[in-house]
Image (tube, helix red, strand yellow):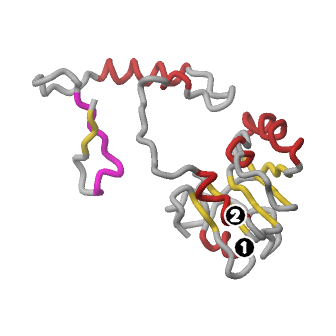
Amino acid sequence: MTRSSGSDDGGRNALTVRSAAPDDGAMTTRTHFDSLLGEGLTVDVEAQWGAGFLDGRYLPGRPSWTWPELARPFLHGADRLLDMGTGDGAWLRALEPWPACTIAYEEWWPTVPAAVATLRPHGAHLVVCLGADDNPASERTRPRLPFAPASFDVITNRHESFDAHEMRRLLEPRRPLRDATGQR
Protein backbone atom coordinates (compact mmCIF):
# COMPACT_ATOMS: atom_id res chain seq x y z
CA MET A 1 0.00 0.00 0.00
CA THR A 2 1.18 3.51 -0.62
CA ARG A 3 0.01 6.77 0.84
CA SER A 4 -0.35 9.95 -1.11
CA SER A 5 -1.80 13.34 -0.47
CA GLY A 6 -4.44 14.95 -2.57
CA SER A 7 -5.34 18.09 -0.62
CA ASP A 8 -4.16 21.68 -0.37
CA ASP A 9 -3.21 21.30 3.30
CA GLY A 10 0.08 19.61 2.51
CA GLY A 11 -1.41 16.17 3.05
CA ARG A 12 -2.05 16.56 6.75
CA ASN A 13 -5.70 15.60 6.49
CA ALA A 14 -5.88 13.44 3.36
CA LEU A 15 -4.98 9.81 2.95
CA THR A 16 -5.26 7.88 -0.25
CA VAL A 17 -4.64 4.17 0.06
CA ARG A 18 -3.71 2.40 -3.17
CA SER A 19 -3.69 -1.31 -3.80
CA ALA A 20 -0.30 -3.01 -3.74
CA ALA A 21 -1.23 -5.02 -6.86
CA PRO A 22 0.98 -3.92 -9.77
CA ASP A 23 -0.50 -1.89 -12.61
CA ASP A 24 -4.10 -2.16 -11.46
CA GLY A 25 -4.25 1.51 -10.42
CA ALA A 26 -7.46 0.79 -8.54
CA MET A 27 -8.21 2.17 -5.13
CA THR A 28 -8.62 -0.44 -2.43
CA THR A 29 -12.26 -1.02 -1.72
CA ARG A 30 -14.11 0.42 1.19
CA THR A 31 -14.69 -3.19 2.27
CA HIS A 32 -10.93 -3.78 2.55
CA PHE A 33 -10.53 -0.59 4.55
CA ASP A 34 -13.44 -1.55 6.79
CA SER A 35 -11.86 -4.97 7.30
CA LEU A 36 -8.55 -3.41 8.41
CA LEU A 37 -10.37 -0.90 10.61
CA GLY A 38 -12.45 -3.68 12.15
CA GLU A 39 -9.31 -5.68 12.91
CA GLY A 40 -7.72 -2.67 14.60
CA LEU A 41 -10.80 -2.02 16.68
CA THR A 42 -10.81 -5.57 18.06
CA VAL A 43 -7.23 -5.38 19.33
CA ASP A 44 -6.91 -5.28 23.13
CA VAL A 45 -5.03 -2.03 23.67
CA GLU A 46 -5.76 -2.03 27.38
CA ALA A 47 -2.97 -4.56 27.96
CA GLN A 48 0.25 -2.59 27.44
CA TRP A 49 0.27 -0.80 24.09
CA GLY A 50 -1.53 -3.54 22.14
CA ALA A 51 0.45 -3.05 18.92
CA GLY A 52 1.67 -6.63 18.64
CA PHE A 53 -0.70 -7.22 15.73
CA LEU A 54 1.56 -4.89 13.70
CA ASP A 55 4.55 -7.26 13.95
CA GLY A 56 5.78 -7.87 10.43
CA ARG A 57 3.35 -5.31 8.97
CA TYR A 58 5.06 -2.13 10.04
CA LEU A 59 8.81 -1.93 9.67
CA PRO A 60 10.15 1.47 10.71
CA GLY A 61 13.58 2.64 9.72
CA ARG A 62 16.19 2.73 12.45
CA PRO A 63 17.66 6.09 13.44
CA SER A 64 21.41 6.50 13.65
CA TRP A 65 21.14 7.19 17.39
CA THR A 66 19.54 5.60 20.43
CA TRP A 67 17.45 7.36 23.05
CA PRO A 68 19.89 6.62 25.90
CA GLU A 69 22.86 7.88 23.85
CA LEU A 70 20.99 11.09 23.12
CA ALA A 71 19.55 11.80 26.56
CA ARG A 72 22.10 10.44 29.04
CA PRO A 73 24.72 13.23 28.60
CA PHE A 74 22.16 15.79 29.80
CA LEU A 75 21.68 13.95 33.08
CA HIS A 76 25.30 14.45 34.19
CA GLY A 77 25.28 16.99 37.02
CA ALA A 78 21.47 17.21 37.10
CA ASP A 79 19.66 16.98 40.44
CA ARG A 80 16.03 16.87 39.23
CA LEU A 81 14.67 15.03 36.18
CA LEU A 82 11.15 14.92 34.74
CA ASP A 83 10.27 12.24 32.18
CA MET A 84 7.15 13.20 30.24
CA GLY A 85 4.70 10.51 29.17
CA THR A 86 6.81 7.69 30.59
CA GLY A 87 4.58 4.86 29.36
CA ASP A 88 5.68 1.70 31.15
CA GLY A 89 8.91 3.37 32.31
CA ALA A 90 11.25 1.18 30.26
CA TRP A 91 12.90 4.05 28.39
CA LEU A 92 13.47 5.95 31.61
CA ARG A 93 15.05 2.83 33.11
CA ALA A 94 17.47 2.82 30.16
CA LEU A 95 18.79 6.20 31.40
CA GLU A 96 19.93 4.95 34.84
CA PRO A 97 21.69 6.14 36.90
CA TRP A 98 19.23 8.97 37.43
CA PRO A 99 19.44 12.26 39.28
CA ALA A 100 18.57 12.08 42.98
CA CYS A 101 15.05 13.38 42.31
CA THR A 102 13.56 11.62 39.30
CA ILE A 103 9.88 12.03 38.53
CA ALA A 104 7.93 10.61 35.63
CA TYR A 105 4.38 11.34 34.65
CA GLU A 106 1.90 9.26 32.71
CA GLU A 107 -1.72 9.92 31.86
CA TRP A 108 -2.81 6.64 30.29
CA TRP A 109 -4.20 4.51 33.12
CA PRO A 110 -3.57 1.09 31.50
CA THR A 111 0.21 1.67 31.63
CA VAL A 112 0.32 3.11 35.14
CA PRO A 113 0.68 -0.26 36.96
CA ALA A 114 3.56 -1.24 34.65
CA ALA A 115 5.24 2.14 35.24
CA VAL A 116 4.91 1.76 39.01
CA ALA A 117 6.38 -1.75 38.86
CA THR A 118 9.24 -0.60 36.63
CA LEU A 119 10.17 2.68 38.32
CA ARG A 120 9.30 2.55 42.02
CA PRO A 121 11.87 -0.16 42.94
CA HIS A 122 14.56 2.05 41.42
CA GLY A 123 13.63 5.19 43.34
CA ALA A 124 11.69 7.17 40.72
CA HIS A 125 8.38 8.79 41.57
CA LEU A 126 5.35 8.47 39.29
CA VAL A 127 2.69 11.15 38.98
CA VAL A 128 -0.54 10.39 37.15
CA CYS A 129 -1.75 13.53 35.42
CA LEU A 130 -2.88 14.90 32.08
CA GLY A 131 -0.12 15.96 29.73
CA ALA A 132 -0.32 18.91 27.36
CA ASP A 133 -2.79 19.43 24.56
CA ASP A 134 -1.56 18.27 21.18
CA ASN A 135 1.34 20.46 20.09
CA PRO A 136 -0.59 22.45 17.47
CA ALA A 137 -3.47 23.27 19.83
CA SER A 138 -4.19 26.98 19.72
CA GLU A 139 -5.89 27.07 23.12
CA ARG A 140 -5.09 25.31 26.38
CA THR A 141 -7.83 22.85 27.32
CA ARG A 142 -5.85 20.95 29.96
CA PRO A 143 -4.49 22.13 33.28
CA ARG A 144 -0.82 22.88 33.78
CA LEU A 145 1.41 20.07 34.93
CA PRO A 146 1.30 19.78 38.75
CA PHE A 147 4.85 20.95 39.43
CA ALA A 148 6.24 24.23 40.76
CA PRO A 149 8.12 26.64 38.48
CA ALA A 150 11.81 25.84 37.91
CA SER A 151 11.35 22.36 39.43
CA PHE A 152 13.63 20.49 37.03
CA ASP A 153 17.16 20.63 35.68
CA VAL A 154 16.32 18.32 32.77
CA ILE A 155 13.09 17.23 31.11
CA THR A 156 13.10 14.24 28.78
CA ASN A 157 10.38 13.58 26.27
CA ARG A 158 10.40 10.76 23.72
CA HIS A 159 7.00 11.31 22.13
CA GLU A 160 4.66 13.26 24.40
CA SER A 161 2.90 16.43 23.26
CA PHE A 162 4.13 19.46 25.14
CA ASP A 163 3.47 23.12 25.63
CA ALA A 164 6.69 25.10 25.15
CA HIS A 165 5.57 27.76 27.65
CA GLU A 166 4.91 25.06 30.23
CA MET A 167 8.37 23.58 29.66
CA ARG A 168 9.93 27.00 30.14
CA ARG A 169 7.99 27.35 33.41
CA LEU A 170 9.15 23.95 34.71
CA LEU A 171 12.80 24.13 33.71
CA GLU A 172 15.37 25.85 35.79
CA PRO A 173 16.62 28.79 33.67
CA ARG A 174 19.14 27.83 30.97
CA ARG A 175 18.48 24.07 31.27
CA PRO A 176 17.57 21.72 28.40
CA LEU A 177 14.42 20.00 27.27
CA ARG A 178 15.35 17.11 25.01
CA ASP A 179 12.94 15.32 22.76
CA ALA A 180 13.48 12.15 20.77
CA THR A 181 15.13 14.04 17.90
CA GLY A 182 17.63 15.85 20.11
CA GLN A 183 15.98 19.21 19.41
CA ARG A 184 15.92 21.91 22.05
* Element assignment for label 1: loop
**What's the magenta region?**
9-18
* Other residues around mark 1 within 10 Å, as few (<14) / some (14–19) / many (≥20): many
Quadrant in the picture for the C terminus: bottom right
Residue under circle 2?
Answer: 155
Label 2 – label 1 distance at C-alpha: 7 Å
Disc on res. 153: none
In the image, residue 48 lies at what x, y percent?
68, 30
* Element assignment for label 2: strand
The amino acid on which the numbered mark 1 sits, given as a three-letter code, is Leu
In percent of the image, x 63 and y 67: which residue is there?
A: 177
Left or right, residue 60 beside residue 81: left
Q: Nearer the viewer, residue 20 or 70?
A: 70
Q: Magenta segment: does it hold 10?
A: yes
In percent of the image, x 80 and y 56: which residue is there?
A: 98
Disc on res. 171: 1
In percent of the image, x 71 and y 52: which residue is there?
A: 95
Left or right, residue 117 beside residue 58: right
Q: Nearer the viewer, residue 162 or 143?
A: 162
Left or right, residue 16 beside residue 91: left
In the image, residue 21 lies at what x, y percent?
19, 21
Q: Does 36 sit above or below residue 88?
A: above
* Other residues around mark 2 within 10 Å, as few (<14) / some (14–19) / many (≥20): many
In the image, residue 62 lies at what x, y percent?
45, 43
Asked if marks 2 and 1 touch (Cβ < 8 Å), the reply is yes
